[in-house]
Image: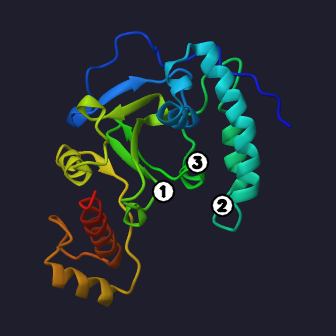
Amino acid sequence: MIPIELCTVSDTQEGEVAPATVAGGWTPTPLEPPGPLSLYLWKTDPEFRGGTPPVRRTILRDAILSITVRVEAELRGVKWHRKKVLEQLAAQQTSAVSPPMDTPELDTGLCAIFGYQKVCVDEANKKVEFFPADPRTWSTELPVWGATTGSRAVLHRPGEEPVGRDLAQWLCDRERDGWKIHWPVSDGTLEEIKKKMLARGTGVGPGLDKPKKADYAAAWGRAEAIQHLGKF
């Protein structure tokens, strides 16, 4: 069993004045302690959400121990990098620094275990990532939560409305502002993809005189994702 020492130094500055909004009008609420597990607890555990930092650290410590057991029991098969999930889960606690900001395996694992979907916004670098990574597979029956990079803050629309609402439009607006969205790439042969795009009237975008298969696959994956997210 890995000893649990929780963070006593944080970079979230909870309690201080946070930016009023991020791009597109979403509102950030800093998390203390930070991290993807804290995001889940903030969304689901009233005691954690309303607790003092010491209370939250105790709840987080207990959650890390219980989720370690669930990861080992539930995340089985070649698609899961359980070793990385467990390493990133253990790193949600440390006595010296805040937890690491890049935890894709843990983010994906928590989404699978607890049944939610996540939009991760990196405003400094103008990037958006999804967990699970392919939003075409997202379920309208599961909640969509937003967070900044490393889950340093929870993101929500005004009035704490869910970020899943009008998400497709929000993402398209970010693209027009020069953001990079981590869209999925479509599978299939070039001919199959072209046929689908022609039926939909979808192009590969401007600036490509001789688009390759990768360009068509990226364009169609984006189009499929936008169409699916429009159902939320």
| Quadrant position of residue 9 | top right
Q: Position of residue 140 (x, y in %)?
A: 36, 59
Q: Between disc 2 and disc 3, whose residue precedes? A: 2
Q: Which residue is mark 3?
A: 110
Crowding near the residue tagged with mark 1, few <14, some 14–19, many ≥20 C-alpha atoms within 10 Å: many
Q: Between disc 2 and disc 1, whose residue precedes? A: 2
Residue 17 shown left or right of residue 53 in the figure: left
Q: Is label 1 in a helix, a strand or a loop? A: loop
Residue that protrudes farthest toward the right in the picture: 1
Q: Is label 2 in a helix, a strand or a loop? A: loop
Where, quadrant-wise, is the N terminus in this rendering? top right
The one nearer the camera, 48 or 23, is: 48
Eyeballing the image, is 51 above or below 159?
Answer: above
**Residue at x 20% of width, y 52% of height:** 172
Q: CA distance from mark 3 to mark 1?
A: 10 Å
Residue that protrudes farthest toward the front in the picture: 46
| Quadrant position of residue 179 | top left
Are the residues flagged by discs 3 and 1 in contact, CB closer than 8 Å? no
Residue 182 seen in this snapshot? yes
Which mark, by number, is residue 132? 1
Q: Position of residue 92 (x, y in %)?
A: 65, 32
Eyeballing the image, is 92 above or below 162?
Answer: above
Crowding near the residue tagged with mark 3, few <14, some 14–19, many ≥20 C-alpha atoms within 10 Å: many
Eyeballing the image, is 103 above or below 9?
Answer: below
Q: Which residue is mark 2?
A: 80
Residue 83 seen in this snapshot? no
Q: Between disc 3 and disc 1, whose residue precedes? A: 3
Q: Position of residue 17 (x, y in %)?
A: 34, 11
Are the residues flagged by discs 2 and 3 in contact, CB closer than 8 Å? no
**Residue at x 63% of width, y 17% of height:** 55
